[in-house]
Amino acid sequence: MKTTFTRRAALLAATATIAFGSTARAEQHMAEQVMEDLHFVVPGGAGGGWDGTARGTGEALTNSGLVGSASYENMSGGGGGTAINYMIENAESLDNTVMVNSTPIVIRSLTGVFPQSFRDLTLVAGTIGDYAALVVPTDSEIADMDGLLATFQEQGDDFAVGGGSVPGGMDHLVAALVMRAAGEDPTMLNYIPYDAGGEAMAGLLSGEIDALSTGLSEAIALAEQDEVRILGITAAERVPAYDSAPTFAEQGIDTEFVNWRGFFAAPGLPEEQVSAMQEAFSKMYETDAWEEVRARNGWVNIYNEGEDFRSFLEAQEQEIGDLMRELGFL
């Protein structure tokens, strides 16, 4: 069942490592076709979270019969700015094209990585999300968030939290938000950045950092391999995929957020074409093909379209901006 974004969930989290490649089974009863074809622009390289989201969504749309055919174009560069600029400059010829993006379009616009923002595009829909988590190695003496906070208070700067993003990026902001909600000064957090989630995990297991801020789907995969202990997750309730992981809220730390992923079209796209795209995405949730893709990737169903999507993004922009100003990044 699909849910909608809420204002309380208007923050970020670490991007999930997406695995994909197997073909979803065809629908036993094909849905009525909504669009003849759909082209996906991916602002990053093959194999990343954006790429997996686009290809998984296209797979579900075509296997369910909602879209006749799907094509993909990877367009890396400028922290996602190259693809955004392409959508704007070629708007008149992109009537069947959507660009995938996520929380970084808000963060990188705020920090000036690129001059555009989501306001320069046609907002189609937010479609999926991934919660965030703080984890420690399984042999760590820290058993829960009370233990982490006690260790942080005792060790100060010697206590390090790592993540697979730059200072001021999603993993850092997630950890800072949790610490602020726990009553600590988020500016005192010793955050260690790594180039990617895999390197950050290696740093955790080698003892370079004491805890790791990461996406929940990544955390679950590592916990199932008995490499990490999940101390807290940013969902409102425990998730069925790993119900032994406690929420931060149940430990007295009132914080929830989700790293959304969704789709944008070129500016000025005719309303009937926007509506067709939204209809295809909305109906996709009810198909077996989508459930197979969603379950395979561990995604959370979150749907918000049009002006509701805009309101969500504006709320997220405000919250992220406030936190980044508090941390000194804006």
Image (spheres, helix red, strand yellow):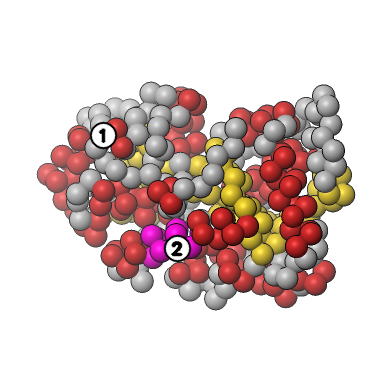
Residue 318 among those drawn in magenta: yes
Residue that badge 1 annotates: 251
Q: Main secondary structure of the magenta part?
A: helix
Above/below status of 223 relative to 162: above
Residue 2, by quadrant, is top right
Give the x, y percent position of residue 145. 25, 36
Q: Residue at x 82, y 46 (%)?
A: 34
Q: Residue at x 51, y 47 (%)?
A: 5
Above/below status of 84 relative to 213: below
Residue that badge 2 annotates: 317
Give the x, y percent position of residue 115. 55, 76
Q: Quadrant of the N terminus?
A: top right
Give the x, y percent position of residue 128. 58, 44
Q: Residue at x 35, y 34 (%)?
A: 247
97 relative position to 44: left or right: right
Residue 119 among those drawn in magenta: no
Crowding at dot 2, Cα within 10 Å, few <14 / some 14-19 / many 20+, comes out as many
Residue 310, by quadrant, is bottom right
What kind of element bears circle 1?
helix
Q: Residue at x 74, y 55 (%)?
A: 275
Q: Which mark is residue 14?
A: none
Q: Is residue 136 visible?
A: no
Q: Which residues are magenta?
A: 313-321
- Indicate the amino acid at tag 2: Glu
